[in-house]
Amino acid sequence: MSKTKFDQIKKAILGSKYDLSIVFITPKKIEELNRIYRDINKPTDILSFPLSKTSGEMFICLSETRKMAKEFDRAYENFLAYLFIHGCVHLMGYDHGPKMDKIEEKFRKQFNV
């Protein structure tokens, strides 16, 4: 996924003034973060951390993303965009559930994901 697409999605969901850091990390490092912050001792594809109402961090493990794309039978680029939308909606303050699903669906449609 291009930097431009990341930026377009981020602006649509979080706004142009939101300060978002995106870090691409190894499976070992994301497993460590997942264990520390979610008490889950295995790697994951994405983690999002709000720092304030106008800033946040997102950690993405591309190798885990590639594995999960296959599991969900999606093209890698498409699944990466799907995850990025998911992470941005978490940064808006939503937790998993019907309301979050509806918001994500709106942005997936907007970006053909």
Image (cartoon, rainbow, N blue to C red):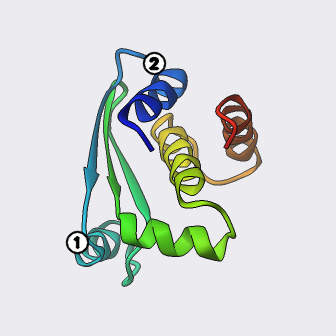
Q: Is residue 69 above or below residue 27?
A: above
Q: Residue at x 53, y 52 (%)?
A: 77
**Residue placed under numbered mark 1 in the picture:** 29
In terms of sequence position, does the residue under pointer 1 or pointer 2 come before the other?
A: 2
Q: Helix, strand, or loop for circle 1?
A: helix
Please provide percent x and percent y for residue 21. 26, 39
Q: Amino acid at mark 1?
A: Lys
Disc 1 to disc 2: CB gap under 8 Å: no
Please provide percent x and percent y for residue 12. 54, 22
Please provide percent x and percent y for residue 29. 22, 72
For residue 15, the mark is: 2
Q: Is residue 42 above or below residue 85?
A: below
Q: Nearer the viewer, residue 82 or 49?
A: 82
Residue at the far bottom in the pictured view:
41
Q: Amino acid at mark 2?
A: Gly
For the C terminus, the quadrant is top right
Please provide percent x and percent y for residue 66. 48, 69
Q: Quadrant of residue 30?
A: bottom left
Q: Residue at x 48, y 25 (%)?
A: 8
Q: Is residue 27 left or right of residue 95?
A: left
Residue at the far top in the pictured view:
17
Q: Quadrant of residue 39?
A: bottom left
Q: Marks 1/2: CA distance?
A: 29 Å
Local packing at callout 2 (Cα closer than 10 Å; few below 14, some 14-19, many 20+) is few
